[in-house]
Structure formats: structure tokens, C-alpha cells
Amino acid sequence: MTLRTELSWSRWLSIAALGTAALELGCGEMVVPRDVPVVRDTVAADASGDTPIAPMDAPPEAGCAMGETTCGGRCSNLQTDNANCGSCRTLCPAGVGCIAGSCSCRTPSLACSGVCINPQMDAMNCGMCGNACAMGQTCAFGMCVADCPMPGRLCNAMGTVTCASVQTDPMNCGGCGVRCSPGYQCAGGRCGCSAPRMMCGAACADLQTDGMHCGMCDNGCGTTGTCVAGVCMCNTGGTRCGTTCADTMTDTSNCGSCGNVCAMGQSCVAGRCVCAGGRTGCGAICVDTMTDMAHCGSCTTVCPATSTCVGGMCQCPTGQTFCGTICTNLMTDTSNCGACGNSCGPGGACAAGRCTCAAGYTMCGAACTDTAFDRNNCASCGRVCPTGQLCVMSACTSAPPLHYTFTRGTLPFVDACAAPGAVRMLMSMDDVIGPAVTIPYMFPFFGRPYTTIRPSTNGYVLFGSTAGPMDNAYYPTMPLPDASRPRPAAFAFNSDLWQRAAGGVCVATIGTAPSRRTVIESLDAGMCCGDAGVAHFTFEIILNESDGTLDYVYQTINHGGPGGAYFVIGAQNETALSGSTYEFRMGPPMMITAPMSLHLVPAP
């Protein structure tokens, strides 16, 4: 039933009177307040020009479309126009629509006593007109139900209305009808895993039994394991190693214990890595020490490049002998003349396995020596100077020398880094003084005896172990002595160098008393700074026990680039009042193409 047939004429007229208080529209029409029922003006058309409602099948008026009527000077469809419903100026209030020319309540509203109400939530007309809910009840979904205190929410499920706690209800988690999956619980309005399960990725997992998440998320037991009380257990009784089960008696990746990997070519037998076919395990590989040149006879013996490994021994080519780490010809090698380690000494030559001496040198025993400066053979073989004295110009004297003389030569280079007992230091370092190294004899430097030395990364050696002003970055650019740095030092190639990781400084003492030699080798140093790895410097300082002389031997001097470079060669005493400079150079070219040496002799 529509409101049009339900209301009395007196009610219609009283409501129409309220319509006159409404706002006028631009075309002379009225707007009715939202709480006013339908108003139908049944007065016939007047001088305003409005025409009464026309039959549905009436022809269209002039200027209007089919089914439209002129109301207040505009065309209107009296079947649907809320301002002209059924006839001109019949107004439908808010919530009421014009349907088939009659003002009716919009779905789901219901007309009760001339007012449109929502029967789904109107406590006075719950579900139908006049059905009032009792005290303590509320209208929800068209049914009277008990009030739902906050923070609860009324939810309708299959016609049953309940007061749900959307913060904890797994059937209404965060909102009505939002259900948590089986195994999940609702907490804080969100679905989560219920104890003792835990969220792992997008699913809940029981960390006590889940083989994919054992004890913690993503800790899988694999196909060979089972999760028991949160711990992966091996199905076959093996040992758990990481994510797999292993037989530590036979597994080459876990031999004897987890993570113990056998070397290439080895097998795991009774929990131990063994090499097959009589081979020996050296580090991470199995080798045949009978034939392997890099492990000849033992894991640490490396044969020279020109040799072969036969029967576990390094075999040199015909005519050469294996001495230490090199193959050499004992007939011509001045450092191994006639026998390994037999050095002919400075000024000596080796011919047919016997040492011969150059002019100015005398054969004393098996080595050549300069009797003018050899304190063990001063002026003649076997004449030893008293303790504290030096041999200067064939005479024993306690007066210290004031400088050194320099003689160029081609003394063979001694690889101190490969010598037995060598000490290696200062790798990957720049502008550093190394720790004190003890030499096994007293060496006289400017007449003062020293038994300790301290190598530098910058091409010089300090005498003595006491700290001093040259213990930091020092590379003099002026002739010696340098009074600003009063320390006893021998400068073989003093410049701003740096030591590579594969290089460094090596110190070794070779030979036997009283003709031992201490060699301080700078191996493949670079030029600081920014040489881009192209500069290579290998040289050494040799301290000769027999006569207190020094040798500077140069194997590789290659600046390798265009930039400037500074270096000085020489020596100075502890007060920097005495000293000698051999040569002073500045800038490239800085290169030698053949071995070169300098022999330094103390002089008064």
C-alpha cells in the first residue's frame, strides 16, 4: 500500500501547509523537509499554467517528450519526479521516492504511521510496523536481540544474531563473518597461529614435529631425518651434519666429524681421510711424493724449475747439483764452488770447482778476502786483530773509520727469503720500521760493534735496537750524512717504497764462522704512491762478518712509469757527523738490465 492511499485528506492538507515554509526553487517549486510525509496538492490547475496529471497514454504536450508534462514552466515526468509526483507540485520528502506516480518508501524502508522507517534497525518498528523491542534489547537485522556492549559487534549468521568479540572470535576476527583457518586463533582482530604452532612463511607449523620447520622456521630435516621434540633426528642412525644425515665413517665431506672434508683423491675409511694408491695428503690434495716436483719426498720440498723429482729426490740436469733450493754448477758458482755453501767471498771467482781471487784479494783458506780490511786476516792470512779493533789499510786499529769507499761489481744475488731460518716481515706495509733482528756475530759499522739490526720498508737498515728519529717514514733526498736524522744506517735504495703482500723484507744469515754473511733482502717492493703495480724493486744489503764490509746487490730496479722518484745510496754513523753518498738520482729512467753490486769498505 502506498502512502497516497493510506493518509487521510486532513493529514494531507496539514502537511501541505508545512510545504509553504520550504525553500523556493528557481522555477517556483517547493522543497519539503526530510521528516515531512508525502504532500499531494489536489487543487486543479490555476493561472500559473500548470496542467493536471495527464493519462499515461495522453499525447506529449508541446515542447515535452513522450510521457512528460509541463510543471512550473518545465517538463516533468509525473511518474518519477519527486518534486511533481503524480501531479505538479506533489513533493516526496527525503527517503521517499516517486514510483509509478506515487510517493513510496525506498527499499528497505517501510511506511509506519506515515513515516518511512528502517525495520532492520528501528527499535520501535523492528521487522514490522509497531513491533517495539523490550527494554535492554536493540533491533538488529530486523530482530529484537539483547544489547551488545562495546567492543562487541552484532553479527548475523544464517539468521542467528550473536554479539561477537571481533578481537578474539575466530568466526568473526576483525569483522563479522571473517573466519580464521583451522589451526589459527584470533588475537587483536587478526588471525594467527595457536600455540604451540608458529607462523613460518604463510602457514602455521608445529616446531616440535614439522620436518620442514624443526625447532625453528626453515630448519628442514630433509628426506633422511625426522623432527622429534624440535630436533632433527637421523632415520638410519647417522650423524646430523647441518641439514643432512651423514655416516662419518665413510662420508668424504664429513669424515670422522661434521665438516671434515677429505682432500681431492682421498677416501674416508673408518672415519679417517686416506689417499689411494700410496699417495700422500698434502693440504687439500693427494700427491705422489716420489714424482711431484712441488712435493718431492715431502709436502714442503719444492724442486727448482730446471729439475725433476725422481724417487722422492730433486734431480738437477746433467752437470748441476741441487743446493738448498737451486740447481747450480759447482764448477763455476762462486757461492757454491766445488761444494754447496762454499763461497769464494767478495772478489772471488770459481773455476773448475776451485776459488780463485781477483786482483787485490788473497786466498785465505777456501775463500778470497781483502787482507787490507779483513780483521781475521789483516795484512796476511790468519792474522787476527784484537777484540775491539778493525783492520784498516792492513793495520789493526781502534780508530773508527770516517767513511766508506764504493766499488761497483757484479756480486751474485743471494735469495735470503729462500734461505734456511729466514725471517720474513713487513708484508703489505708502508713507511714502517721492522722489529729488531739479532745477528749471530758482532758487525762493526763506522767502527762501532752491533749485534742487532732493524730493516725498513723504505730500503735502509738501522743498526741497534734503540728507537730513534728514523723509526718513522724516512727517505732522504740529499747526500749523506743527514744531520736531521742522526741514526746509524745503511741505505741501499732509499726511497718512498711499499712492500707487497707477496714480498716483504727477509733476513737470513748464511755461511759459517768466521765468514758468515747476514742478508737483508727487499723482495719486489713497489713505488709509493700510485705506481699502479708497474714498479718492481728487488735488492739486498749484505753484512760481511770476515772484514766488516757491506755489499749492496741489485737484482731488479724498474720504476715502470713516467713519474718522478727520489732515492739515495750510502751510509752514515750514529751522530750523522760521518757518512758517505755513492750517488744521488732524481726521476726516471730508473732501471738496470743486468745484476749490479756495490762493495762498501770502511776507510779512515
Image (cartoon, grey):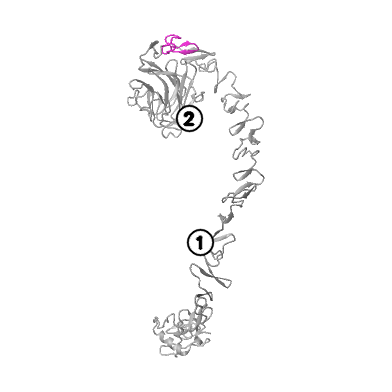
Question: Is residue 558 in view?
Answer: yes
Q: Position of residue 193 (x, y in %)?
A: 56, 58
- Front residue of 376/200: it is 200
Q: Which of the image's four quarters has the C terminus?
A: top left
Identify whether 21 is placed above or below 544: below
Residue 380 is a magenta residue: yes
Identify whether 377 is placed above or below 231: above
Read off the magenta span.
360-385
Which mark lies nearer to you, 2 or 1? 1
User: Which residue bears the numbered disc 2?
Assistant: 503
Q: Which mark is residue 188?
A: 1
Q: Secondary structure at mark 2?
A: strand
- The rendered magenta stretch, by its main secondary structure, is classed as loop
Q: Position of residue 428 (x, y in %)?
A: 46, 33
Identify whether 237 is placed above or below 195: above
Left or right side of 217 for 408: left
Q: Secondary structure at mark 1?
A: loop
Q: Position of residue 67 (x, y in %)?
A: 50, 84
